[in-house]
Image: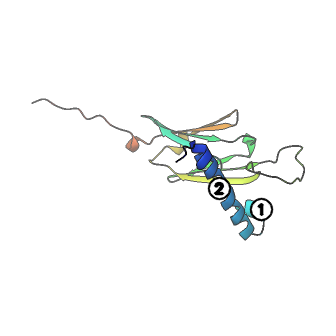
C-alpha cells in the first residue's frame, strides 16, 4: 500500500468545498436563466453585522465599504432594527464579463430582531472608515439589577 499525502489523494478540504460551492452556484444560475439573472435576484447577507452587549448597551457594527453614509436609513420599530441604503457601482467599471462577482451594487435592506428592549430615542450611529457602529442603550427593564442579600 502506497502512502499518499492528504492533498494528493483527497485534495485539500477547503479547495473541495470551494469547488462544490462553485458547482452549486453554476447549477443554480443555469436553472435561473443565466448568471446575471441569478445574481440580480440573489441578495446574500449584506451588510455583515456583529451584535454585542455590555451591562448598559447593545452595539451593532456593520461593514459597509463603498456606501455613502448619507444614503443610510436606520430605524427601530418595536424590537426590530432595520438598515437600508444604496451601494453605488464602482467608478470606472464598464460592462464586462465577470469570472466572479461577489461585490454587488444596488439597494439593500437588513432587518434584525434585537434580543432585548432598548431606548430608541437615545440610540446613536457613527460611520467611520466604512464601518457603521450603532449604540443602543438598554431599557431599564432589560438591565440586570443587583439584589441585596440580608444576613439574619
Q: Secondary structure at mark 1?
A: helix
Label 1 belongs to which residue?
A: 35
Whole-percent x and y of residue 122? 54, 39
Q: How is the image coloured?
A: rainbow
Q: Determine the residue positioned at 65% across, 56% down.
A: 21
Q: Is residue 43 visible?
A: no
Q: Quadrant of residue 54?
A: top left
Whole-percent x and y of residue 94? 90, 50
Q: Secondary structure at mark 2?
A: helix
Q: Determine the residue positioned at 73% across, 64% down.
A: 29
- Judge by depth and name the residue closer to the eye, 45 or 112: 45
Whole-percent x and y of residue 25? 69, 60
Judge whether 81 appears above or below 69 on screen.
Answer: below
Label 2 belongs to which residue?
A: 21
- Judge by depth and name the residue closer to the eye, 21 or 7: 7
Whole-percent x and y of residue 85? 71, 49
Number of other residues with Cα within 10 Å of mark 2, as a class: few under 14, some 14 to 19, many 20 or more: few
In the displayed structure image, the side of residue 2 where residue 47 appears, left or right: right
Amino acid at each position: 500500500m502506497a502512502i499518499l499525502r492528504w492533498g494528493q489523494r483527497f485534495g485539500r478540504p477547503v479547495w473541495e468545498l470551494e469547488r462544490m460551492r462553485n458547482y452549486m452556484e453554476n447549477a443554480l444560475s443555469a436553472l435561473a436563466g443565466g448568471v446575471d439573472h441569478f445574481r440580480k435576484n440573489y441578495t446574500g447577507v449584506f451588510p455583515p453585522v456583529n451584535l454585542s452587549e455590555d451591562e448598559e448597551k447593545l452595539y451593532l457594527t456593520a461593514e459597509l465599504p463603498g456606501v455613502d453614509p448619507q444614503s443610510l436609513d436606520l430605524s427601530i420599530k418595536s424590537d426590530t432594527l432595520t438598515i437600508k441604503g444604496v451601494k453605488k457601482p464602482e467608478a470606472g467599471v464598464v460592462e464586462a464579463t465577470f469570472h466572479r462577482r461577489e461585490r454587488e451594487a444596488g439597494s439593500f435592506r437588513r432587518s434584525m430582531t434585537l434580543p432585548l428592549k432598548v431606548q430608541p430615542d437615545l440610540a446613536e450611529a457613527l460611520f467611520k472608515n466604512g464601518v457603521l457602529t450603532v449604540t443602543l442603550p438598554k431599557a431599564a427593564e432589560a438591565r440586570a439589577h443587583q439584589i441585596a442579600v440580608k444576613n439574619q
